[in-house]
Structure formats: C-alpha cells, structure tokens
Amino acid sequence: MFDPRDNVSVTQDANRLLAKARQDGIETVWQRHEAQQPQCGFCDMGLSCRICVMGPCRVDPFGQGPQSGVCGADADIIVARNLCRMIAAGAASHSDHGRDLVEVLAGVADGSAVGYQIRDEAKLKRLAKEYGVATADKTALAIAADLADAMMEDYGMRRKAIRLVERAPKKRRAVWEKVGLIPRGIDRETSEMMHRTHMGVDNNWQSLLLQGLRNALSDGWGGSMIATEVSDILFGVPTPRPTAVNAGVLKADQVNIVVHGHNPVVSEMVSAACQSPELLDLARAKGAVGINLVGVCCTGNELLMRRGIAMAGNHLMTELILSTGAVEMMIVDYQCIMPSVGKVACGYHTKMVSTSDKAKFPHMEHVEFHPHNAREKAMTVVRAAVENFANRKGQPFIPVEPQAAVGGFSVETIIGALGGTPAPLIDAIKAGKIRGAVGIVGCNNPKIKHDYGHVTLTRRLIENDILVVDTGCVSVATAKAGFKVPEAAAMAGPGLKEICGALGIPPVLHMGSCVDNVRILVLVSALADALGVDICDLPVAGSAPEWYSEKAVTIGVYFVASGVTTHLGPMPPIAGSMNVVNLLTEGLKDVVGASFAVEPDPEKAAVFLRNTIEGKRKALGLDWRAVV
Amino acid sequence: MKQVIVHPERCVGCMQCMLACATAHSRSGTLLAACQERPRPNPRIHVGAGRFNEGFPNRCRHCDPAPCQMACLAGAIYRRESTATVLVNPDRCINCASCAMACPYGVIRFHEDPLGPAGWAIAIKCDNCGARVAKGLIPACVETCKTGALTYEEMDDAMARKTRAVARSLSAPDRPAMPAGVVLLTSIKQAEMQLGER
C-alpha cells in the first residue's frame, strides 16, 4: 500500500522537505489524501448528483440498486451533467482571470491603474487589428481603451462568435461550424452550461457534452487567450531568459518572498516593489543581503516567463516550501492555493497575505490589491516581509542546490528563433528528425507520485525525437529534472538533439502558465496554416499526466475540441457511464478528429502518444513507424 | 434467520453505512440532529481502505464462539441466541478493553454513548440493530447501502445466489462478472497506486 512515510516524490527537495515537515508536526496534502481513503466510489464514477434537493441521489454501478435519480436522470445524464459542470467551473476560473486583466487594460487607458503600463505596443496594435479596432492616428492608450471595450464584448451576448476564434485554421472553424461549437460569448457559454445542467433542461447526454465542448472552447479561444494576450501587452511578450528552479532558490541570507496563485496583476507589482531601493536598504538594515522573490504555481510561471524569476516548486510543493523556515512572506492571489497553507505557515515565522477580493483564506492577513492601489499595497506587504526577516527562528533548511533552466518561449519567440517562419520546424518534422510535438500540461495530484508522470513521460518523448512544450506545474517538474537547459539536448534522440543544437534551445520548451496553454493553440494553428491542414492532421498531441483541477478538465476539452488528441493520467469522474467514456475516448474522433485517452502509467502513455504521432505522420504521407 | 451479509467486492467506499449506523444509534434518530448530540453517536461499522484504496465495510461478525465474550472478565459480553447477536451489557462493562484486544477484526470501540450510561465510556459494538429489527425495520447499514455490498437475508439464500452467479460466470464467460465502468475505475486506481511503489 502507498505509505505517505515513504518517498512521495521523484524530487529530492520534496522528499527532504516532507521529512522536515513531519518532524515539525506539519500536516500535508499526502496525509490528508490518505485520511480520505477510501474515497467515495459514487463520486469517483460521477454517479452521485447533488444538483437539486429532491436528491441527493446516486446510481448503483452494479445495476441492482437505484438506476436513476429522483428526477429520472440515468447514469449517462448524471455523469454528463457532472462533467459539464466541471468544464463550466474551469472555464469560469480561467476566463475570470482574463477579465481581471481586461479591467487593468481599461484602467491603464483611463489612468486609474496606477503603476501599470503598456509594455508592448506592437502587440497591442496586433490585437487591435484582430479585434477590428482602429489604430491610425490614435495613442496607445486610446487603442487600449477601445481594445479593452471590444474584449469586454467577447464576454457578453452581442456576438455571434468570439473574436479570437478567427485565429483557428479555416478547416478547424469549418468543423466547429458544422457541429455548432463556435462559442458566442465567454460568459454566455458558461451560463448556458449551468442552465442546461439544471434539473429538467438538457437531458440528452450527447448534446450536454457538445455544449461542454463549446464551453471549453469559449475559454481556450476566449477567456484564457485574452488573459495571455493582455498579460503580454501589459507586462511584455516573454523571451527566453535563464532562471533557476527547486527549493534551493530560497536564500538563507536574503528576505524570501514567495508569490503563489495565477494572476500577474499582483505578482508583477510585488516584483517591482522587491526592486525598490528603499526596501532593499531596509532589508540590508535588517541584516539581509537582499530581497529574493520566487514563485510557486502559475503566478511564478508568469514572472519566470517575463522576468526570469526563479520557481521554488509546483502545486504539491506549496506546503513544503514553507517548511524550509526560510520564507518571510507568501503572497497569494487565487486558484490552486490549498486552504491548508495558512495553517502550515503557523508553524513558522512566515507571514501569509491574501490579495484578491474574491479569494480569502484561513490564517492569512487580507491586503486587498486593486489596479488603482496595487503599487502602493505591494510596497506595504514587501515592507512587512522585510521586517519579518528579524523573526526567523534558527537556520533555515534549504535542502538542495538550485537547478538552472531556461524559460520564456512564447510563440513569438519560437517563430523568431526559427527565423520568422515555422518552416524550419515543419522541415524538421517532414524529414523525420523531429517526429512531432507534445504539449504536456496540468497539475500535480497526490494520487500520482509527485512529478513522476511529468518527468518520465517527458524523458521518453524527447528520447524518441518528440519536441515537448509545457506549461503550468509540469514546467517546474521538467525544469527541476534538468530538461530545460540547452545541454539537455544530450538526453534527446539524435534528430531532436541536432535541431536543438542548431537552434541552441532545450528539448523541452517552457511556454508559460496554465492560461498560457493557449500559446500552444496558437502555435499549432500556425503549423496547420503553414501546411494547409487542420490541427487534427498534425503530428502533435497533448497530455496531462498528473492533473487534478476543474481548469485542467476544461483545458483538456478545448485541446480535444481543437483537434489535439489528449492523454490524461488520473481518471475523470466518468466511469459510471460507459456511453460517456466511449464518446470521449472514441466517438469524438468522428466529431472533432481527436479524443481522450486515460493511462496513469507514463511509460504506457509515452507509447500511446508516440503511436498517435506516428499515425498522423502516416496520414500526412510522411515516414512512420509503429511503436510497441 | 436473516442476518447481515457483507459482499466486499460491491463496496464503493461511500461510507454511507457509517452515517446510517451512527444515526440509528443516536437519541434523535435523524442525521442532522444526531450530529449535534453530546455525547456524539459513533458508527459501529467502519469502512477501511484496501491495498488499492478500495472500500471494505468492516463490521462485527458476531463470532461463535466469540473471542471478545471469552475475554470479558466482567461477564458483560453475552450472546443472544434468538438473533445470533453478540451484545454488551452496559451496566457490567468495566471499560477494560480486553474484548477489543481479543477481537480479530478491530470492531469494538470505547466511548461514551448516547444510549449508554451517562458520564463514562463503555465497549461499543454492532448490535445488529436489534431495536430497529424489533420494529420490523432492517439494519440501518443495509438499508442505506445502494450497491448491495451489505444485504440482510437468509444465509442459505445468499449462498445459493452466489453459487448461481459463479456458475453463470463460468458457463457464459463473455458476460462480465463486473460492470465495465467498475473494472475501468479499479484498474486505473490500481495503476496509480503501483506507480507510487516504483
């Protein structure tokens, strides 16, 4: 049996810090997961329904107990409704993050978002053009005002289609048009999903799932894409820059501040405050040699992509990082912040600060950041962190030396590195030097040994000449494993090694945070356009080996609906309906040209993904080989 | 005579039997009120996790001869032959835990109970819901179980049903003994657990 006292991770820092946490009497996610066993089988199979209070209901998977809820919904309907509500929640989360960025953009335009600015005017103008916003003879701020307004329209109900769907290849749009999957408004699709899953509305499991696809697309080509693009306008388009990863990025002789969450609106201001001469002087006065800002989770990725700021860890590291005793302050915004972290911090001198009006946590001080006061609030909290340096108890435990990595591969950068066109990449794929590409995305999950899925799958793929792009928590795992330095090309197969060597890039490219999965959509669209094919014809695939969240469900669904066959490590709660299982793993191929596969073992998943890619190569008339 | 029979392969680990058991052994008899009672009623059936985190409803077997009964120095544990139930006399129990040490299944707990003497802990174990059965109800854990992991029936009937199921699975092997979704989920969970052992 899995024993949480054994090694829970493939990473040395996690195992050492877990031992330290246990010694310090800190409860972690692994203990809580163990305490939850066995987890409810009805819920695990998607067969429990809490949608209305004629219920709650459950369906007996063995066929002898109740086979429908009080309302009459059978297993297919209950499973589909539950899955669709996960999609709606995931889409709502990413898209609400996008909305916050649009508000900052509007605030920059009207002067209220003090401290924020347009960092990339060229990108602002490119976006303005896509949105049909006039740019001639207008100042950047005037363009920003009109663009923010146009983006707000995408969230509403005035459009027949959200704007950025135009970025998808023509053939893909035709598929969506045919099946009725073109998202009309970002919030509209989420609202309609919640409406349809209300008792007594849509009770056809297929049409429910199709709306689930449209809802996910409203995030992938809508809310998330807006989040990424507006972040680039406000904070700069990422470019490759060296950084460092793992718990070793914390510094014993510096004030350590950890940002946790997702939205760069907060972390960028904190980053600026950490560089203020006034606070650096204060840090020195307190006996620290400097202020060391590091990230965990995706807001860390946002900073890593644009500023090269180091990453201390991914999702399952967020509690362990605090057990170093080296963290003066953790500043959180929203999403994936375990409510336990405040309690963990109680065991150390660490101050915890929540910043978002929509996300409050136990054992945290709430300092609310808004666009108009973020600069000032950032100075306040960083000052408090510096002052907390004096409260450190004893020598911190920093378990490892940091690992070097390179991040910051935006689509603009990748195409730039290729000489302004995707042609060299396409040529390498055609020649078979690169067999294809896989986007590995998603979270950590205590059900899977920490980072084992990410690292094993990535290793197997690059060994076999498959280029890996990654985002979110995966990107930290692969960076810690040493895949994100140019020298890691030595671990790649001969073809990929040659290409990486020629371009001076690692075999695994860090494309950003989890909203930045949309960069992958833009990249595959560029490849498909260059070849004149649909996305589902490309030798590419997706994977989420250790996913846990509703956002990850939505990402997986928009990948598949965009034509990218996607592997999942953990099983989504759908096993209660084999109809739903079969539709998602087989039937969708006939609808959108791609489907899901579930396989916890990354070794077997690697074989599946390689065969998927080889199959696409065969269909394109390229050389191919069967993998066993 | 009907008795509670456990079919562990059917347990999905939802733990609803535990809630139903605690409620059945409360003063109020409803879940919402039972949660507020002091002392708090506790379940006498316990769902454990197997090697692959599958559920297992662990319940008193009402052994005969019963090791707990033999270990009880105070003579508090006795057998009611009419219902084949091993019971604790709360007035005799001295809370020495000898019975719990003797029990091979770990199903005897010690706490103050809403239906026991006020102010001190005694041995608490499954009583086969004698009070419910006397009213013509079936045991609470069985009533709440929707997957058939717990049934209340004549042992002979259960045996005959099992024999028939085994015979059918052998004569028509294409008919799966387990539904496809259950097999799928179980295999995924097993694979996840095995990764942790690599």
Image: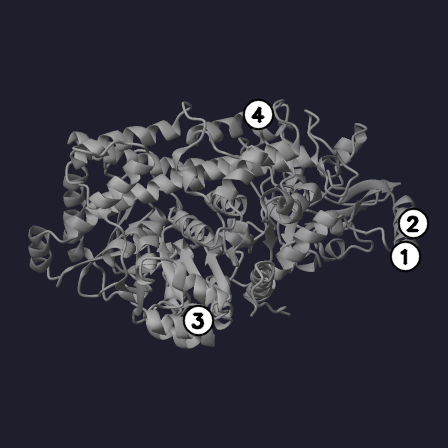
* Distance in Å between CA atoms under marks 3 and 4: 50 Å
Q: Residue at x 30, y 51 (%)?
A: A302
* Distance in Å between CA atoms under marks 2 and 4: 42 Å
Answer with left or right where residue B180 lies relative to residue A51.
Answer: right
The image quadrant that residue A40 belongs to is top right
Per the image, the residue denoted by label 1 is B170
From the viewer's perspective, is the residue at label 2 or at label 4 nearer?
Answer: 4
Give me the chain letter of mark 4: A
- What amino acid does circle 3 point to? Leu
- What amino acid does circle 2 point to? Arg
**Pointers 3 and 2 within a single chain:** no
Residue A610 locus on image (x, y percent): 56, 64
- Crowding at dot 4, Cα within 10 Å, few <14 / some 14-19 / many 20+, comes out as some
* Distance in Å between CA atoms under marks 4 and 1: 44 Å
Looking at the rendered structure, the secondary structure element under dot 3 is helix
Residue A22 locus on image (x, y percent): 41, 61
- What amino acid does circle 1 point to? Leu
**Could you tell me if residue A132 is visible in this image?**
yes
Q: Where does the N terminus of chain A fall, quadrant-wise?
A: bottom right
Per the image, the residue denoted by label 2 is B164
Residue A578 locus on image (x, y percent): 70, 44
- Badge count: 4
Answer with left or right where residue A466 lies relative to residue A96.
Answer: right
Q: Which mark is residue A198?
A: 4
Per the image, the residue denoted by label 3 is A496
Q: Residue at x 31, y 29 (%)?
A: A150
Answer with left or right where residue A202 lies relative to residue B180.
Answer: left
